[in-house]
Image: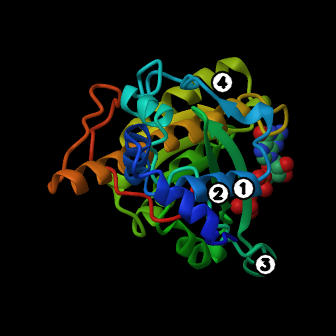
Amino acid sequence: MVRPPSLHEQQALEGSREHPTLLKKKKKEEQSEISPVLRTFIMSVLPPVRKDRIISQLPKCFSKGATLHTEDGFNSKVKTACQEQRTGTVGFCKDVFDKNYKATIGVDFEMERFEVLGVPFSLQLWDTAGQERFKCIASTYYRGAQAIIIVFDLTDVASLDHTRQWLEDAMKENDPNSVLLFLVGTKKDLISPAQYSLNEQDAIKVAQEMKAEYWAVSALSGENVREFFFRVASVTFEANVLAELEKSSSRRIGDVVKISNNSSNLYATSKKKPPNCCQ
Ligand SMILES: Nc1nc2c(ncn2[C@@H]2O[C@H](COP(=O)(O)OP(=O)(O)OP(=O)(O)O)[C@@H](O)[C@H]2O)c(=O)[nH]1
């Protein structure tokens, strides 16, 4: 919950309009659309992000053959926007989640808080049931997703084939140009390196068709799990900030300004839809 600023805080803000340095600061704040009072307040009510959830460099992809981002670092526009606190609504959560969802409708929910380039960023993870009988329920949770993670079993070839169907279901609810896709093979601990190499070729092919980033992990040993979620947080964060920058540029100039992401995306580049929920 967020309270409105007090009279004293409002007066402090009003007074800042006179001074040129503060004017510049105010301009920055207008661009980010969140007042400093509100920003400070939100920062003070949220617990600090855990030290091991701080991301200052773009984590590496798993395979250069199927990645969403081929550059070594974050987009320079995003880095500058973070330094200048011009990330708009990215980094602020309205705390609208109703924890009761979890038990009643069979969809699991987790929230992981990160700090990316100094900006708080929360990933809301909705784990939908894979079974056919829950398909209807699951599909309602795909809507408006900013990233979709499709998980298959590395020891079961049929489950890789099935990912196409899951993707099709998820895409009925989303604009393909505004969703970041990840294809993840799990149970890496149960497969021999030789068999894994064979299966990986097929998985990378499917990931390329889907325009997804490919990862192989083990939930049992924890191999690549942390790296994967850090990558999801970072790539999603970057897309969100770029969308915010695009939104504010088009508003200021009065026209839509496309932010090119150069060659950082292996797949066809497209205009990202601005985020429609809290981050
Ligand atoms: N050895 C091993 N077992 C795993 C791994 N990942 C999942 N499992 C096991 O596989 C089974 C199914 O895992 P879940 O994570 O529940 O699979 P799911 O696809 O989410 O299942 P639904 O929730 O029914 O959709 C469980 O018994 C897990 O313990 C892994 O990386 N290694």
In the rendered structure, which disc, 4 or 3, sits on the residue that comes first in sequence? 3
Residue drawn at 38 percent across, 45 percent down:
23
In the rendered structure, which disc, 2 or 4, sits on the residue that comes first in sequence? 2
Q: Are marks 2 and 4 in contact (CB under 8 Å)?
A: no
In the rendered structure, which disc, 4 or 1, sits on the residue that comes first in sequence? 1
- Regarding residue 115, the answer to whether it shows in the image is yes
Vertical position of residue 225 compared to residue 275: above or below:
above
What residue is shown with label 2?
124
> How far across and down, in percent of the image, does residue 75 sit?
40, 28
> How far across and down, in percent of the image, does residue 222 sit?
80, 33
Q: Secondary structure under badge 1?
A: strand
Q: Are marks 2 and 1 in contact (CB under 8 Å)?
A: yes
Q: Is mark 4 within 8 Å of ligand 1?
A: no
Q: Secondary structure under badge 3?
A: loop
Q: Are marks 4 and 1 in contact (CB under 8 Å)?
A: no
Q: Nearer the viewer, mark 2 or mark 4?
A: 2
Q: Amino acid at mark 3?
A: Asn
Where, quadrant-wise, is the N terminus in this rendering? bottom right
What residue is shown with label 4?
195
Where, quadrant-wise, is the C terminus in this rendering? bottom right
Name the side, left or right, on which 277 lies relative to 24. Answer: right
Alpha carbons under labels 2 and 4: distance apart:
34 Å
In the rendered structure, which disc, 1 or 3, sits on the residue that comes first in sequence? 3
What residue is shown with label 3?
100
> How far across and down, in percent of the image, does residue 47 sit?
80, 50
Alpha carbons under labels 2 and 1: distance apart:
5 Å
Q: Amino acid at mark 4?
A: Gln
Alpha carbons under labels 3 and 2: distance apart:
15 Å
Q: Nearer the viewer, mark 4 or mark 1?
A: 1
What residue is shown with label 1?
111
Q: Residue furthest bottom?
A: 104
For the residue pair 226 and 216, the one nearer the viewer reads as 226
